[in-house]
Image (cartoon, helix red, strand yellow):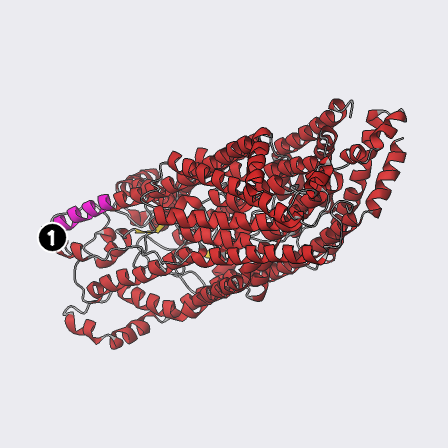
Amino acid sequence: MISKTFLKETKELLRDGRVRIAFFIVILLLGLAVWISARQYENVNEQYEAAKMAERTIWENQGEKNPHSAAHYGTYAFKPKYPLSLVDQGVDKYAGTSIFLEAHNRNEAQFSAAADQTGLARFGDLTPDFILLFIIPLLIILLGYNSFTKEREMGTLTLLKSQGISMGKWILGKWTALFTPILIMTAFLFLVAGVLLSGLENFGIFNWSALVVMFLVYVGYYIIFINIVLLISAKTRKSGVSLVISIGVWIIACLAAPKAASNIAEAKHPYPTRQEFTANVLKDKKEGLDGHNPWSKEAKLLQEKVLTEYGVDSLHKLPFNFDGYRMQKSEEHEAEIYFKHYNYLKEQFVQQSHVYRGLAAISPYLPTRFLSMAIAQTDYATHWDFADAAEEYRIATQKFLNDNFAENSEYGNWGYRADADFWKNLPAFDYNPPELDSVLSYNASNLGILGLWLVGSFGLLLFTTKTI
Amino acid sequence: MLTYNFRYELKLLLRSRWIQLLSLMLLVLFGFSAFNGQQKVEKRRSDIAEAHLEMRENDAMMLMLLDSVEHGLEVSVPYWTIPSSPMALGNYYPRVAAMEPQPMAFLSTGQADLFTHYVKPTVSGDDFALNFTEMTSPVQLLFGSFDLAFVIVYLLPLLIIAFSYNVLSAERENGSIRLLAAQPITIQEWVMQKLGLRFFWMALLVTVTLILAFLLIGMDIVAQATSFLSFLALVLAYMLFWFALAFLINLQAGSSAKNAVALLGLWVVFVLFVPSVVNQLGNTFYPMPSRTLMINEMRSLKEEVAKKQDEILDNFLRDHPEYALNDTTQSRGFYHRYMASQRLIREELSPAVNAYEEQLQKQQDWIGRFKWISPAILAQESLNEMAGTSTENYEDFRKQVIAFAETWRGHLTPFLYNNRDFSQKDYPNLPKFIYQKSQASTWSGLAIILVLSGLVYLIGIFIYKRQKERNILTTF
């Protein structure tokens, strides 16, 4: 019976001009979106490689220079783009792409793409994730809203009832008929993306398992929508009403809930403004050790401590340059301050994530969106990971420079210059994003919520529709 | 006939509880979104107020320090932050350049979550390094804000669609179309009257709930009467467009479900596709130059300039002989060289920096040429304009800040090159930043939406006339 219903429904769908047009449009849009994203991706990657090379050359060719001047001169860390960003751009557009690494200051990533675009960019982009997250659910609604209502409207319901059909089998038949085309389409898209990505040259680390997991997440998302649409169709009497209610669900899940969640999250756990943040950091810095200020109380304390430790009575008798040593101590102290303040930001971000997870109860879109971004390495957590790695590199660089200063010159010698070759000894910044396993375990709660939705929607569909 | 229709329609709407449901939904949506908008505006206001307060406290501190220095007393701050040095003053005691919210700012978040509302330019900072983006979670930027503009641009059309997709088709499906055909009125007129009445009721409900929502968040509607009326006019015009579309689709005599699918398809096209396609094409035709490559350029330039600092200072002083004449000490330190080279870097980099602005302007012009394709773009842009949160507003603010940074530098540089100390009596002359809002008319968007609505209405009538031979009673 399941297969008969499936065959009948599939034939009907294939013969329906509306369905053919809709499919055609979605495929066309997807193709367009993939093409645009692939171009963008290649473009950005080229720029990234060029910028990275140029920056390293600038750093290595500084010539003879005082290490601390080099520290102020600083260097840049550029954020790479990952292959799966082709499928989901995530928050990449809104997060900065380069971090300036200098002495005494931890800087935020700057130059986000959105800041360089017009207000229209806020409507959203024609990217594969837009089609996957918004348009395919709409397609599901279009294909399935009258699945049951049409039987009533065309008068075939009485005929069906006389067949002695079991409700469960009937529903499963309809379900498979709706699920198959969606599955084929999604599988096709991911296959194309996979082939395209493994064909692109010099693209970092692309692995098929991440793509497969992403595919499964989307299939789960679509199953939830299919269940909801069929449930609504079975519970309403008219096709028009069923359509309007389904669209209502879509609006709440995909449009309203994320926006409302963002407002609630911001109201409950706000970020400080940029200026406030800087002022707070500055206040903490003022109270502590300042490497440039040998007259402050903290500097004097450090001086005494070091003098007693080495058992000498003058800074000139120390086996290293105390200026460099103090610089390093102050750098460590400042790094701690930044750590504290950025940790506060991170704390707010984690709290906000809880709000989003809470609202996922009314929207399967939210966990899917977060999972998809995380797997594509375009989510906020990956951005944090990158920023932290850059900060670690900054601290290591400062130590590298200050140690050279302290070891190779004597106290008071600010005229010391390091060799022109010295800069090459600093290892280049190399960032590796978190692996798939750790991404998935970090997003375990999102996976759990999606699983709950899946089980819950199946349960509702199968157990509440005993009669039509 | 109109009066009959009016009475019947009202009874129908009341008894099907449509009016009750609609008022409740509108009230909840408008209330929630207006509250969200107001919350953001209040945070913005308090942030700016706090910044000003902090500046006043710092200024009081600065005046105390200056007083001590002038009386020859020892001060307890590091010597390079003592405000009697003009550069220390310019770097450690900057002014707040703030963009105060407009009275209607709560209407639309626009770009307000992306950009900062106050900066403190310093004398030695780079203008292009001034960061105008705000510290926000990018997830929030991605999802956007549940503001009034969202409710009006995205959700209101859907309510209209749900309210009007089956005006004619329901009659056929309920079997009452034969009764209707027996009435002394053409179908076209009847649909027109019926949709007109629904528009009237919905407009009334929207106006009343909007006023209620505005009163709820404590807006003074009387004081802002003109802004409020132009806002209301825009909302009604936008609603009219969607009712005109509903009229067009209803006359095609499809089934209810077909009508709903067609209207939703149009919604997807106008609200989701056209804006993103127009934006994407703008980006493709006028791509932004790479920011990362700009960093490289800036770095090599700085490197070059740093090597020739002395030469640059000499050239600068040659161009400005007044500094050499007025100063008897002729002492030249770090800042003399630094400020002269910064100036050179600014001049050299200005073409690269301007390229971004020009490209953004080109994108904006491109959108300006094609925005009439979608009333959603027109409505959103007009709302941003009313709220003072559009891209242009922030671009304008940025320009004003950069001009102010120049003023700030220009005010303090003579002190530096004349080797004159900054003193208490110079304090009142310090420049202040005052944000000037650019006045843009929002009526053009409204006019275009009205023209579009008229056009859709005419197309509806035209198509209907062409296929009049079809029989309304038999065709399906």
Q: Is B253 rendered above or below residue B396?
A: above
Image mark 1: chain: B
x, y percent for residue A294: 28, 47
User: Is residue A110 among the parts visible in the rendering?
Assistant: yes
Identify the residue position indicated by label 1 in the image. B70
Give the image quarter of residue A417: bottom left
| In this picture, residue B437 sits left or right of residue B460 | left
Kindly state the secondary structure of the residue where label 1 is placed: helix
**Crowdedness of circle 1 by 10 Å Cα count: few (<14), some, many (20+)?**
some
Q: At 71% across and 40% down in the image, what residue appears?
A: B177
For the N terminus of chain B, the quadrant is: top right
Give the image quarter of residue B357: bottom left
| In this picture, residue A175 sits left or right of residue B386 | right
User: Is residue B36 among the parts visible in the rendering?
Assistant: no
Q: At 88% across and 39% down in the image, what residue appears?
A: A7
x, y percent for residue A323: 34, 50
x, y percent for residue B321: 21, 76
For the C terminus of chain B, the quadrant is: top right
Q: Nearer the viewer, residue B234 or A195?
A: B234
Magenta highlight range: B56-69
Question: Does residue A371 belong to the magenta stretch?
Answer: no
